[in-house]
């Protein structure tokens, strides 16, 4: 039974992460659409609002809840996991990821009501946080060590710094045109 629940857990982690990654990409496009002249701005904003709501409520949020249910079921089926230090660190990262999820939900509601507080560059950087969390969680689960995962996270942080620098360079060249 445990292996079936684990498979469901992994499948919905993939769905949840795909939804979060695509959602923030939609936020970027939605924000950039505000620079378009009318009627394109209104048409694009309405379309992005519909796409965001469908992605959020049909895929992303249900996937998050299924991940949590499957994870809790695995802990129930194998209570020995509670003794593993890596699990406690993983659960901390999961709580941060759930917080990230609800911050994205708040951004979606703001944008639907015409409030755009974050720039597209800030949203690109925000998207990297989900990547860092994903790497940290996967390294913890695969290595099953509360210490060795640090090397993987340091690597992804360095990679993220490179990506963030690339975002800044991209912005520089885009604005230069």
Image (cartoon, rainbow, N blue to C red):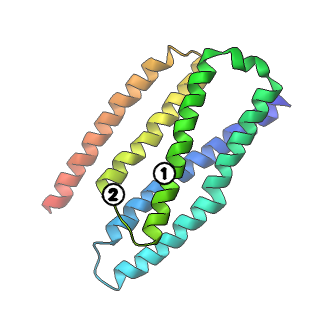
Q: Are marks 1 and 2 in contact (CB under 8 Å)?
A: no
Compare residues 113 and 62 and report the one nearer the observer: 113
> Could you tell me residue 121's position as x and y percent?
29, 53
Q: Earlier in the sequence, mark 1 or mark 2?
A: 1
| Secondary element at image label 2 | loop
Identify the residue under disc 1: 103
Check disc 1: other Cα within 10 Å, few if <14, some if 14-19, many if 20+: few
Q: Where is 2 relative to 25, above or below?
A: above
Q: Is residue 19 left or right of residue 4?
A: left
Which residue appears at 79% of the width and 34% of the height?
A: 73
Which residue appears at 69% of the width and 47% of the height?
A: 65
Q: Which mark is drawn over residue 155? A: none
Name the image quarter holding the C terminus.
bottom left
Which residue appears at 49% of the width and 58% of the height?
A: 106
> Could you tell me residue 117's position as x and y percent?
34, 61
Name the image quarter holding the N terminus.
top right
| Secondary element at image label 1 | helix
Which residue appears at 56% of the width and 66% of the height?
A: 53
Q: Is residue 140 left or right of residue 162?
A: right
- Residue at the outermost right position: 1
Image quarter for residue 115? bottom left
Identify the residue under disc 2: 118
- Residue at the outermost left position: 176
Compare residues 110 and 74 and report the one nearer the observer: 110
> Could you tell me residue 79's position as x and y percent?
78, 21
Question: CA gap, disc 1 to disc 2?
Answer: 12 Å
> Could you tell me residue 111's position as x and y percent?
43, 67
Q: Is residue 59 left or right of residue 72?
A: left
Q: Where is 122 relative to 96, above or below?
A: below
Compare residues 89 and 130 and report the one nearer the observer: 89
Check disc 2: other Cα within 10 Å, few if <14, some if 14-19, many if 20+: some
């Amino acid at each position: 039974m445990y292996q079936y629940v684990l498979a469901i857990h992994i499948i919905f982690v993939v769905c949840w992460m795909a939804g979060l990654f695509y959602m923030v990409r939609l936020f970027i496009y939605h924000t950039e659409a505000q620079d378009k002249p009318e009627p394109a701005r209104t048409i694009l904003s309405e379309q992005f609002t519909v796409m965001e709501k469908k992605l959020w409520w049909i895929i992303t949020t249900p996937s998050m809840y299924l991940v949590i249910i499957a994870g809790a079921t695995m802990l129930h089926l194998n209570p020995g996991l509670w003794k593993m230090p890596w699990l406690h660190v993983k659960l901390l990262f999961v709580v941060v990821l759930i917080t990230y999820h609800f911050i994205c939900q708040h951004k979606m509601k703001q944008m639907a009501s015409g409030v755009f507080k974050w720039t597209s560059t800030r949203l690109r950087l925000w998207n990297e946080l989900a990547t860092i969390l994903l790497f940290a969680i996967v390294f913890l689960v695969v290595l099953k060590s509360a210490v060795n995962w640090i090397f993987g996270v340091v690597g992804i942080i360095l990679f993220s710094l490179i990506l963030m620098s690339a975002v800044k360079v991209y912005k520089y060249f885009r604005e230069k045109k």
